[in-house]
Amino acid sequence: MALLVNRIDKNILKQQLAGETFCRKTISFYRYVLIDNPAKLRDELYFRWHQLNCFGRVYIAGEGINAQMSIPEANWNDFIEHLYHYNFFKDVPFKHAVDGNGKSFYKLIVKVRNKIVADGINDPLFNPANTGNYLSAQEFNAAINNPETIVVDMRNHYESEVGRFERAFCPDADTFREELPQVIEHLKGKEDKKIVMYCTGGIRCEKASAYFKHKGFKDVNHLRGGIIQYAKEIKESGLESKFKGVNFVFDERIGERITEDVLSKCHQCGNSCDRHVNCKNDDCHLLFIQCKPCEEKMQGCCTQNCVNIINLPIDEQRRIRKGRVKNGPECLAVYKSRLRPNLSEILKNAIHLTNTK
């Protein structure tokens, strides 16, 4: 049997992807279903998908599967035939990327997890199968046109920062497990109101809608297929997009533009921008919003410290990374999303210190 993990250097893989002359489909899918042996299924899927030259990030758990993938168009039918061979995945619906360029993943990762969506729910009485009502794009537009409807964004703060539906409540949270109690608290006393929620591809709302019903909310609804499917439906039907800006996606593209509206600002200079990047310092990789002029000025980094580090010899960079104390005071990778550094303030202070020397 072939090696069931990828050990090739990522830079080589990215070069190979860039040199591909064929087209790929970028898709996502999920299904909540009981899987008796996730580890065995993981190995079977990886083996066959590796043969089909599939890339992506896939999580498998006892509660189901969550996948974002890139499939060569020539192998699409073989991929479908193999996936549907498993009865519990039969006719699982796919969401197709808006841009469709296929350059979304450069390798295949299939992991076994405790849950396909980490939710922090430990209530034995909770039934995730008791979900809310599904809404099509047209039905969702009609629902949010009613000012009495409560619209909830079930994504992380960095996702809603660059794109969101009109009038949506956007939790100030970094993870789905943080969002659930925040939203429940925000909606306390509104259990009889009409609730409509959305997320990227539908998987978080699937579980959230069931949890809201479990918590006593009467009229719970969620967007079928999430923003990805919504964008496809409004394009095909000529509907107005109530979603404005960019749909954040968890692959190499980082975002899919839905409308030309720019809702956010560069985290360094404050100019209008909705372009997410990762800091070029390999010991940081902070996800932040950076405009093109700041990218050039800061060499793709978030702070001057990171600029200084990437200009060191590679061996010195590696020595620093190896010698740092994880999460300690000398740790360079301190700018995790939960800390949300004020980059403009950090840069301003750095300039001030430089000028006073």
Image: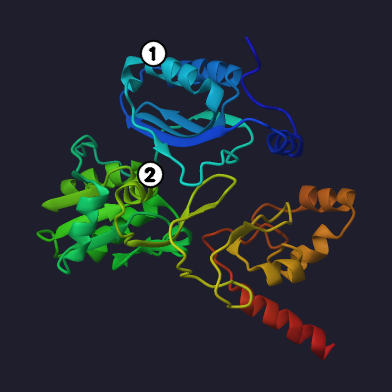
Query: Residue 85, which numbered label?
Result: 1
Residue that appears at 74% across and 37% down: 15
Q: Is residue 115 in view?
A: no
Residue that appears at 58% across and 73% down: 342
Read off the residue under disc 2: 201
Side (left or right) of 118 relative to 348 = left
The x and y percentages for residue 283 are 72, 53
Q: Quadrant of the C terminus?
A: bottom right
The x and y percentages for residue 243 are 35, 60
Residue that appears at 63% across and 32% down: 107
Of callouts 2 and 1, the N-terminal one? 1
The x and y percentages for residue 59 are 47, 32
Side (left or right) of 220 relative to 159 = left
Q: Residues within 10 Å of mark 1 (few under 14, many from 20)?
A: few
The x and y percentages for residue 230 are 33, 49
Q: Callout 1, which amino acid? A: His
Quadrant in the rendering for residue 284 = bottom right
Task: Quote the CA–CA distance across marks 2 and 1.
Answer: 23 Å
Q: Residues within 10 Å of mark 2 (few under 14, many from 20)?
A: many
Q: Nearer the viewer, residue 119 or 307?
A: 307
Q: Nearer the viewer, residue 118 or 261?
A: 261
